[in-house]
Image (spheres, rainbow, N blue to C red):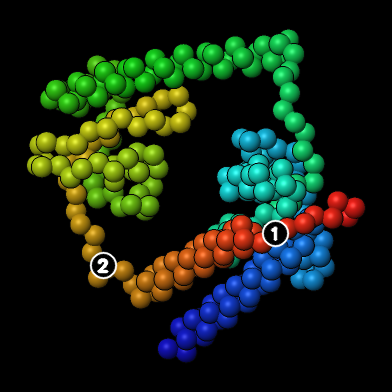
Amino acid sequence: MHDQLLQEATSAERDRQYNELAGKMADQTYSNPSSLEPAAAALDLPIQTTPLFSHTGGEGLAANPKVVAAAFSDDVLVQGNNSSLIDLGNNHSVVIHVDKHVPAAAKPLAEVRAMVEQSILEERIAAAARTQADEVLARLHKGEDMVAVAKSLDAKVVSVPGAVRGQSFQVPAPVLKEAYLLPHPSAPDKPQFAEVDMGDGGFAMVAVDKVQPGDLSRISPEEREMLHRQMAQAYAGEVTRELLETMRAKTKIKINKNLL
């Protein structure tokens, strides 16, 4: 048991150090809402800068939806405060501060003509694809054979027995997600159907003909412990965020504009 106990103790100590540091960072950035520098100096952490990004995101940290949402929030963008602690997962968190904001402005038509034309074309293609997907789904609901329907469209049917949530690399993620949202089929010859937007302008059909309940006895103690730590970390991050939001709502904040 030595190696297992050592691993558990090391992991627990790492989590404790992370939570302690995250708590200090949250305190420092909340106490000094107009700048990240006091927290960076106190905790010996670097301040990183991203290029400008829009509501749709950017590169690096700016590609994370949580970071984008925080950057464009009223508290951060308009009030000029530091964000609350943003949990990025896997013992990574960040606090952001807006350094520069460029208001949105309309571009000359000549500059965006090609983009507009491409956007219109993609919208029409997506609309046509959805119409066809609706028609195919209606055919399946009427009882037409899926293989025959696929053949009429020059498409193929891929059967995946025993697809497991989050662990089936044979099934695209959007299809697997939709499959787990469907009701259980009443019989193998009466599958449940749905259409799936693949996000690339195309659609897929998914048919679920059998559901096998999960077996908790197959989860190893190590996996249970890992899931327990992940849930505890997620809960701690959410509680910290809610606490900071409550404190901000109940605390009167005065900004010294001379220091901005």
Give the number of the mark in front: 1 or 2. Answer: 1
In the image, what residue occupies the spot 67% across and 65% down? 26
Dividing the picture into quarters, in which one does residue 84 lie?
bottom right
Q: Is residue 47 visible?
A: no
Direction from residue 129 to residue 205 in the image, left or right = left
Residue 254 image offset from top left, x and y in percent: 77, 57
Snapshot quadrant of residue 89: bottom right
Q: Position of residue 168 (x, y in %)?
A: 35, 49
Q: Which residue is drawn at 56% across and 74% down?
A: 15
Q: Is residue 13 left or right of residue 25?
A: left
- Image position of 231 with respect to 108: above or below: below
Identify the residue at image location x=69%, y=48%.
76
The residue beneath circle 1 is 252
Please say if 219 is above or below 86: below
Q: Can residue 221 be seen in this view?
A: yes
User: Vertically, is 109 above or below 142?
Assistant: above
The N terminus, quarter of image:
bottom left
Which SS class for mark 1? loop
Between residue 190 and residue 52, name the one nearer to us. Answer: 52
Above/below status of 63 relative to 43: above
Neighbor class of circle 1 (other Cα within 10 Å; few <14, some 14-19, many 20+) is: few
Looking at the image, tell me whether mark 1 or mark 2 is earlier in sequence order.
2
Q: Quadrant of residue 247?
A: bottom right
Q: What residue type is labelled 1?
A: Lys
User: In this orientation, which residue lies closer to the viewer: 21 or 212?
Assistant: 21
Q: Is residue 135 left or right of residue 99?
A: left
Question: Tag 2: Cα neighbours inside 10 Å, few (<14), some, or many (≥20)?
Answer: few
Q: Kindly identify the residue that appears in the image at 39 percent across and 70 percent down.
A: 223
**Residue corresponding to mark 2:** 216
- The residue most toward the bottom is 2
